[in-house]
Amino acid sequence: MEKKLYGITPSGEEVFQFTLENENALVTLLSRGATLDKLIVADKNGVKKDVLLGFDDLEGHMTRSDYQGVAVGPFANRIAGGRLNINGKEYILPPNEKGRNLLHSGGLYTEAVWNGEFEGDNKVVFKRHFMDMEGGFPGNTDVEISYTLEDDGTVLMEYKAVSDSDMYFNLTNHAYFNLSGFDGGDILNHKLKVNADGFLPVDEYSIPTGEIMSVAGTPFDFREFKEIGKEIEADFEQLRFTGGYDHCFCLKDADKGYRLAASVIDENSGLALDVFTDLPGVQFYAGNFLKGTIGKGNKPMNKRCGFCLETQYYPDSPNKPQFPSCFVMAGESFYTKSAYRVYKA
Ligand code: BGC
């Protein structure tokens, strides 16, 4: 366990880096963005690999980020038109994508510097108070995001929020993985399995249409392990709209609570990733928009050199009454948990 000063933001806020380590993994976390910064595991040859894309310094996180490793909230992914209707009152949040959608809440949780503390010997808790209308969202809100490094190397992420306003909460982590290491080339040979029979088709602006499409017979069928690259270039409208996989999968057993959502295997390193969650969806994003910005080790993060599995409620669900609701009443506690476990397959 170690806590050290990582950097100071231009507005003078101190950002700390926290380290948790056991015999299976080493994790570093940053208080800016409640960020999962590094996850280092030994591969099949015993070589220690950092399997997360990211940056070596605060400046990288602040100026070149595509949300590498950060916490996203209060509402992850997109809200159509930035329109949030709460009990008949409409909040219009300034769109930050294509002049029309709100993506990742405009970076509200991501760009915040959180108060971090160790709890016990394997957990870091990040806390932040958000004022009513901060970032355009209603409610004085207390949020807690914690990371626990479990004995088997699992990184458990817990999210809590309580607000004095009714609100929609959808918090996630946006880590990009490459199981061959952050400098391991593209992830097209990684094999993915998702515990989902359906996914959410989107319009050309990446807003879910509101339907659920069966994965059967489509490039979105990951019910058995399949290489990410196998059909990513298929002539299929949903892939054309988004330039590769960038969709929410509707996880099975939504009523069963915490369960395995998705797994990935990389034969090159012999490492596997399991993703667990109690949430109904997982956004599989194949890193299609990465365009060579410089990251860890001064290496460019090129298109599809990392993938994300962002556990979440469905995108734009506040505007889609048929989707599972993440509406939380004032004073009620919001709580969810998800985990990443990287291990030798
Ligand atoms: C979105 C992508 C977006 C990426 C980085 C993902 O969650 O689905 O469309 O490019 O985040 O912002």
Image: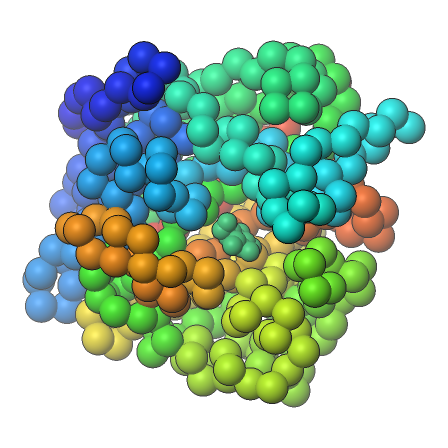
Quadrant assignment, res 245 = bottom right
Pinpoint residue 82: horizontal percent, then vertical percent. Answer: 72, 39
Could you tell me which residue is drawn at 36 percent across and 34 percent down? 62
Q: Quadrant of the C terminus?
A: bottom left
The residue at 61%/47% (across/down) is: 97
Colour scheme shown: rainbow
Q: Position of residue 23 (x, y in %)?
A: 14, 45
The reply to whether residue 183 is visible in this rendering is yes
Count of all numbered marks drawn on residues in the image: 0
Q: Residue furthest front?
A: 99
Residue placed at 44% from the left, 57% from the top?
308
Left or right, residue 147 beside residue 170? left
Tell whether 216 sits left or right of 61: right
> Does 305 appear above or below 84?
below
Q: Residue at x 66, y 59 (%)?
A: 206
**Residue 99 on image: x %, y %:** 67, 46
- Is residue 51 shown above or below 32? below
Task: Inspect this view and state whether residue 51 appears.
Answer: no
Residue sitting farthest toward the right? 88
Determine whether 264 is above or below 137 in the image: below
Quarter of the picture containing the N terminus is top left
Q: Is residue 153 left or right of residue 107?
A: left
Measured from the top left, where is residue 43 in percent x and y? 16, 63
